[in-house]
Amino acid sequence: QVQLVESGGGLVQAGGSLRLSCAASGTIFSIRAMGWYRQAPGKQRELVAHITNGGITNYADSVKGRFSISSDNLKNTVYLQMNTLKPEDTAVYYCSANIATRRTLIYRDYWGEGTLVTVSS
């Protein structure tokens, strides 16, 4: 089956940077899109950034100009470069991917377990 594994989370001071990575593996035929979501304690999960197979990106307004999403289609990997981090960026960051596992191209959403990003003031 499909597995998504995130890495790169950690503790940084405000103004610092981190780069998150997410690699998809398993029975993968095609990935249509990948993205990052985050959930802070006591808050609802929200979209951070999203990228399609064709390279079209979307960002939450709160991270525009600070975060950048990219992907390596050959490696089935998506990255999130986070710069000028703020305490309000503190959250568990989850990787998601819209994946077809067979040539029938039936796409479903898959999720990683999450990686914690903590930004201290």
Image (cartoon, helix red, strand yellow):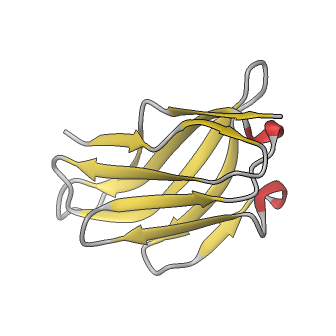
Name which quarter of the figure residue 40 lies in: top right
Q: Taking 55 as reference, is 31 above or below it?
A: above
Residue visible at 54% across and 58% down in the picture:
80
* Residue 79 spot, x, y in % from top left: 47, 60
Q: Taking 72 as reference, is 92 above or below it?
A: above
Name which quarter of the figure residue 99 lies in: bottom left
Q: Nearer the viewer, residue 58 or 84?
A: 84
Quarter of the picture containing the C terminus is top right
* Residue 53 spot, x, y in % from top left: 42, 74
Q: Nearer the viewer, residue 74 or 54?
A: 74
Residue visible at 53% across and 55% down in the picture:
35
Q: Taking 12 as reference, is 19 above or below it?
A: below
* Residue 48 spot, x, y in % from top left: 67, 52
Quarter of the picture containing the N terminus is top left
> Is 37 on the left-hand or right-hand side of 21?
right
> Is 19 on the left-hand or right-hand side of 90?
left
Residue visible at 47% across and 47% down in the picture:
96
Tag count in the figure? 0
Name which quarter of the figure residue 28 lies in: bottom left
Q: Taking 82 as reference, is 45 above or below it?
A: above
Residue visible at 56% across and 66% down in the picture:
69
Q: In the orientation shown, which residue stands out farthest toward the top? A: 42
Q: Nearer the viewer, residue 114 or 18?
A: 18
